[in-house]
Image (cartoon, rainbow, N blue to C red):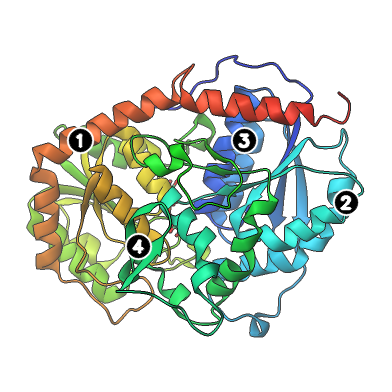
Amino acid sequence: MSSESGSVLVRSPKTHVVLLPSAGMGHLTPFLRLAALLAQNHHCQLTLITTHPTVSLAESSLISRFLSAFPQVTQIDFHLLPLDPTTVNSNDPFWLRFEAIRRSAHLLSPLLSSLSPPPSALVYDVSLISPVLTAIEALGFRLPAYIFFTSSARMLALFAYYHVVATTTALQFVDDVLEIPRINPAIPISSIPPLLLIPNSLFANIFIEDGPKLPHFNGVLINSFQGIETEAVEGKVVGALPPLFAVGPLVPCEFEKIDDQGEQLLKWLDDQAQGSVVYVSFGSRTALSRDQITEVGDGLVKCGFRFLWVVKEKLVDREEQEGSLEIMEKTKGKGLVVKHWVDQGEILSHKAVGGFLSHCGWNSVVEAAWHGVRILAWPQHGDQKINAEVVERSGLGIWAKTWAWTGDDPAVVVNGEEIAAKIKELMQSEMLRVKAMKIGQEAKRVASVGGCREKILKGLVQEWSKNRMDA
Ligand SMILES: O=c1ccn([C@@H]2O[C@H](COP(=O)(O)OP(=O)(O)O[C@H]3O[C@H](CO)[C@@H](O)[C@H](O)[C@H]3O)[C@@H](O)[C@H]2O)c(=O)[nH]1
């Protein structure tokens, strides 16, 4: 697995940075990758605030592995107040947790005040903007605050601009697209996260409340890089934003490795020809319906390529039932189907993997780009169609645009024949293979010692070091 190794870049031993991630692996993972870079390469003193309890087992396991790898990092448990789910307009466990953190945010003021030395900066998750800002304003000292945006720069543009066109009762569009200044092409309505089109959904309300607050921050950090999104690097994301820091690509680190990947899985990959396998995964929090699982199985068998498929039936890993699925029997001999957490970084770095059928969670996109693996985009919900647009425009992959959102509606099913045809198109395209490889090379260049990412992080740490209370 290609992990990033540390190198000595900057000495700023007393720059104390506090990191506050939010719920779900899609938010926690890039945060911890950023933390690893700050601790390892930039020698910051770090405090990591972790919310308890976590939604998934994967989150608590990743936090433990991170803290074992970085014993110098101070961890603070942030115990959440109980949340009455009937007071929240959602039943998604991850959204409920975002809301629980938001409603507990006032408890952060005493916690931040007690830190020694006083922090030079706070970097916190995009899902917590307004309530944590209030907690910071209640501190007896000035704490520079930065937002970490865990999705694409294109999605950041939507996040920053949505409140301009939306009210809680109506969303206005012209000609089926949302024109955002400086964002080209405009975002089609069909790509807008469905929850943003529902007045008063929790998601829409957070966008409306938090988007206008972005100018209050010292900066926005984003896990993106040149080669996949020029918006990220050129800061071409709506006018009234604070400075944008493209700290990507944030890619798999040593501490993420798991011991129980399963020898069977790696041995199976070792036995496959170079670039011959399509890897299938829809991230950490998307479950497919039984009918859709059957059709994906059918498509994989019909596509004629070997496959490694991580099946999820439940949103939250602790609810997943042990045991094999019928589909595992049906597909035997054609590919490998697993139902447990895998080390995706290790899989994408394997020479046998030539393509990735992905929901386009932003971390999966960045990881595929890093390893130069082409993507067949199948967005399921949320920001994923906007990320799929980035995948298509950058040349990293293709997108079956006619496939409807399936993540939120079990009645919508894409059939196996269509899935097989698109996988063939992906795997047989030499042009896509080469383009993905080039994007991978560009990602490595950006993340190399002396590269853009290092310069941006170095500048940030220098900025933070000026805020040191003891300086
Ligand atoms: O078995 C697994 C499953 C997932 N992963 C990792 O888990 C992360 C998943 O993140 P992502 O690919 O972004 O997908 P989601 O888990 O769906 O992430 C949520 O958060 C993202 C970042 O905000 C959004 O882009 C997504 O739409 C949202 O669903 C990635 O690092 C994967 O490598 C594994 O290592 N093993």
Three-letter code for the amino acid on which mark 2 is drawn:
Leu
Three-letter code for the amino acid on which mark 4 is drawn:
Ile
**Up/down of 330 relative to 365, above or below:** below
**Up/down of 184 relative to 63, above or below:** below
The residue identified by callout 2 is 139
Locate residue 267, reporting x and y percent.
27, 35
How crowded is the residue under tag 2: few (<14 C-alpha within 10 Å), some, or many (20+)?
A: some
Is residue 355 left or right of 159 when viewed as pictured? left
The residue identified by callout 1 is 435
Q: CA distance from mark 2 to mark 4?
A: 39 Å
Locate residue 129, reporting x and y percent.
66, 58
Q: CA distance from mark 4 to mark 3?
A: 32 Å
Quarter of the image where one finds residue 65: top right
Q: Measuring 61% from the left and 24% from the top, which residue is drawn there?
A: 458
Q: Earlier in the sequence, mark 2 or mark 1?
A: 2
Image quadrant where one finds the N terminus: top left
Q: Measuring 23% from the left and 75% from the top, which residue is drawn there?
A: 413
Q: Earlier in the sequence, mark 2 or mark 3?
A: 3
Question: Which mark is on residue 35?
Answer: 3
Mark whose residue sits in front, 2 or 4: 4
Q: CA distance from mark 2 to mark 1?
A: 49 Å
Mark whose residue sits in front, 3 or 1: 1
Three-letter code for the amino acid on which mark 3 is drawn:
Ala
Q: Earlier in the sequence, mark 2 or mark 4?
A: 2
The residue identified by callout 4 is 187
Mark 4 falls on what kind of element? Answer: strand
Mark 3 C-beta closer than 8 Å to ligand 1: no
How crowded is the residue under tag 4: few (<14 C-alpha within 10 Å), some, or many (20+)?
A: many
Q: Nearer the viewer, residue 236 or 377?
A: 236
Mark whose residue sits in front, 1 or 4: 4
